[in-house]
Each structure stands twice: as C-alpha cells, then as structure tokens.
Amino acid sequence: MTRAARCATNDGMGRTGGYEDPKGEQPVREEPVRVVLADDHAGFRRGLEEMLSTDGGIEVVGEADNGAQAVELAKETRPDVVVLDLAMPVMEGREALGLILRGVSPPPGIVILTMHDQARQRRELLGMGASAFLAKSASLAEFVAAVKSSTPKCTPREISDEAPPPA
C-alpha cells in the first residue's frame, strides 16, 4: 500500500522527495502543490500561472498584486508555497516575507522573484527564511523546480493517519 504525503521535503540543497517511513517506502504526493502568486504585473502573473499549470502537480489558489494582499491571501488559503515578487506597491516582498512566515501556520515555502539577481540580496532573503530566489527571466523548468522544492518539510502527522509517526 502506498501512502500519500501531503507535502514534499526540501533538503535545503534544492533536492526534493517525500517523507521516508520506517519501512523504507517513499510516499507519492497525490495533492498538487498549492501556490499563491504575488506580483504587481498582471501579465507576468498570468504568464507564470499558465506556465506552472502545465505541471499537473501545481495548483494556483490565489493571486495578489501587492505584498499586503499576498499576506492576506496566504492567511486565507494557507498555501504550500507563495511566489513573491520583491518589488511591489503597498508592501514590498521583503516585508511580506516576514509577515507570512510569522502569520501563517504552518508557514509556506517562499519563492522570491526579482528582476535583479544580486548575491548579497539573495543571501539576506534566504537568511530571512525564503526557500528559493529566482530571477524573473528563469525558465519554466527552473520555476517548477523552485516551487516544488520550496514546499514545507513534512512531519509524520502530515504523512498518514494510518501509521504512527516514526520514533
């Protein structure tokens, strides 16, 4: 019998997988990764949604055009991942990142998008809790990989109700 994981694990190196149970079985994710997209350019959001929807394992559950809306949507929808533009009106992505990670339980993975990929900025945002950092010019494969590798780590309770958590 195959168990279904609610989320994939992210080992911090960009590699994903499922929770490994004591019997050595690797669960298969049956539910799509639930994503909120936040970017102030509607055309970019629409294109990103279309790109991500080509992968059957990703479902966009909300869109925001500023950081404040992203925070509210994350609280309402409790997504697995929030894709967050860094430069937005009302509230920038940097501030929204902190509010989402502190205000949503369990906290979603955060993929930061930017027009300008700067190493110092990348280190700072990853240190603040972002799961991934991508330039807006990234390929479809890079976007999909970033979203899937940013899902929160599973806990045994999220894996299966049919088996006790490992000791």
Image (cartoon, rainbow, N blue to C red):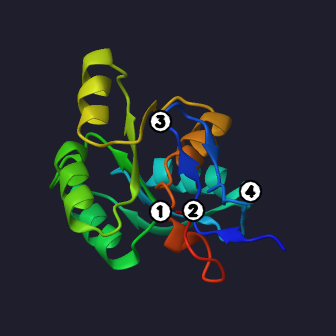
Cα separation, mark 3 vs mark 4, equals 19 Å
User: Earlier along the polypeptide chain: callout 2 or callout 3?
Assistant: 2
Residues packed near mark 4 inside 10 Å, few (<14), some (14 to 19) or many (20 plus): some
First in sequence, mark 2 or 4: give its number: 2
Q: Secondary structure at mark 3?
A: loop
Q: Nearer the viewer, residue 127 or 141?
A: 127
Q: Residue furthest top?
A: 119
Mark 2 Cα shell of 10 Å, populated few (<14), some (14-19), many (≥20): many
**Distance from Cα at disc 2 to Cα at disc 1:** 8 Å
Amino acid on which disc 4 is placed: Gln
Q: Is residue 76 left or right of residue 53?
A: left
The N terminus - image quarter: bottom right
Count of marks placed on residues: 4
Q: Identify the residue shown where x is 34% and y is 61%.
A: 107
- Disc 2: which residue: 7
Q: Residue furthest bottom?
A: 162
Q: Which residue is mark 1?
A: 80
Judged by depth in the image, the label closer to the viewer, 2 or 1, is: 2
Tell me which amino acid carries mark 3.
Answer: Gly
Image spot of residue 35 (x, y percent) = 50, 62
Residue closer to the observer: 51 or 127: 127
Kindly check if marks 2 and 1 are in contact, taking CB atoms under 8 A apart as contact: yes
* Residues tagged 2 and 3 counted as in contact (Cβ below 8 A): no
Badge 1 local density, few (<14 within 10 Å), some, or many (20+)? many
Amino acid of disc 2: Cys
Give the labeled residue for mark 4: 26
- Inter-mark Cα distance, 1 to 3: 16 Å
Question: Going by the picture, which residue comes out furthest to the right?
Answer: 1
The percent position of residue 25, horizontal first and vertical second, equals: 77, 58
